[in-house]
Amino acid sequence: MVTKIIPVRLREEELKQIDQLVEHGVFQSRSEAIRELIKLGVEIAHLSEVFRAVDRLFELERIEGRIPIDLSGATQQLLKEREEAINPSNAFLSEGSFRLSSYPDFWKR
């Protein structure tokens, strides 16, 4: 992964909070703290987009009386893979097949 160094201006109050995180051992340095907090912010922004899309689907369901897309097969597959992620001893897929259950932490949220 290629990284770039960028200058950043922070207000005194944010810098104090970052310094506290470093002092308490949450992060090893200001750079690490800022980098990880930016990653978290980006992830939260992405999740809020997903939540808005889901809200829109529910709105469309309310208006049209149904969700405007058919996810029945996908839903069954996701539930099956979630179960496999929770109980890996029950999992069986041929080698090379794509599995969302390869990311078990996602399903534990």
Image: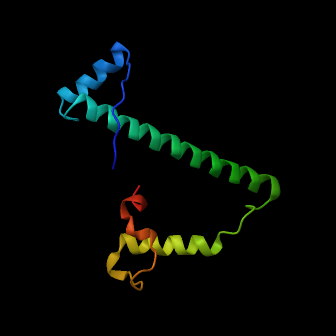
Judge from the rendering whether residue 94 lies leftward or rightward of residue 24; answer left or right.
right
Judge from the rendering whether residue 92 lies leftward or rightward of residue 17; answer left or right.
right
Question: From the viewer's perspective, is residue 20 above or below residue 101?
Answer: above
Judge from the rendering whether residue 104 lies leftward or rightward of residue 57; answer left or right.
left
Q: Residue at x 38, y 69 (%)?
A: 102
| Numbered marks: total | 0
Task: Indicate the quadrant where residue 15 lies.
Answer: top left
Could you tell me residue 95's position as x and y percent? 38, 84
Along the viewing direction, whichever of 105 and 37 lies nearer the viewer: 37
- Give the colour scheme of this rendering: rainbow
Q: Residue at x 64, y 73 (%)?
A: 72
Question: From the viewer's perspective, is residue 74 above or below residue 58?
Answer: below
Could you tell me residue 86's position as x and y percent? 37, 70
Q: Residue at x 27, y 31 (%)?
A: 31
**Name of the residue lying farthest toward the top:** 12
Could you tell me residue 64's position as x and y percent? 82, 57
Could you tell me residue 100's position as x and y percent? 45, 68
Along the viewing direction, whichever of 31 and 94 lies nearer the viewer: 31
Judge from the rendering whether residue 53 lies leftward or rightward of residue 10; answer left or right.
right
Task: Indicate the quadrant where residue 103 lies.
Answer: bottom left
Along the viewing direction, whichever of 11 and 24 lies nearer the viewer: 11
Which quadrant is home to the C terminus? bottom left
Q: Residue at x 59, y 72 (%)?
A: 74
**Name of the residue lying farthest toward the right:** 64
Along the viewing direction, whichever of 4 and 34 lies nearer the viewer: 4
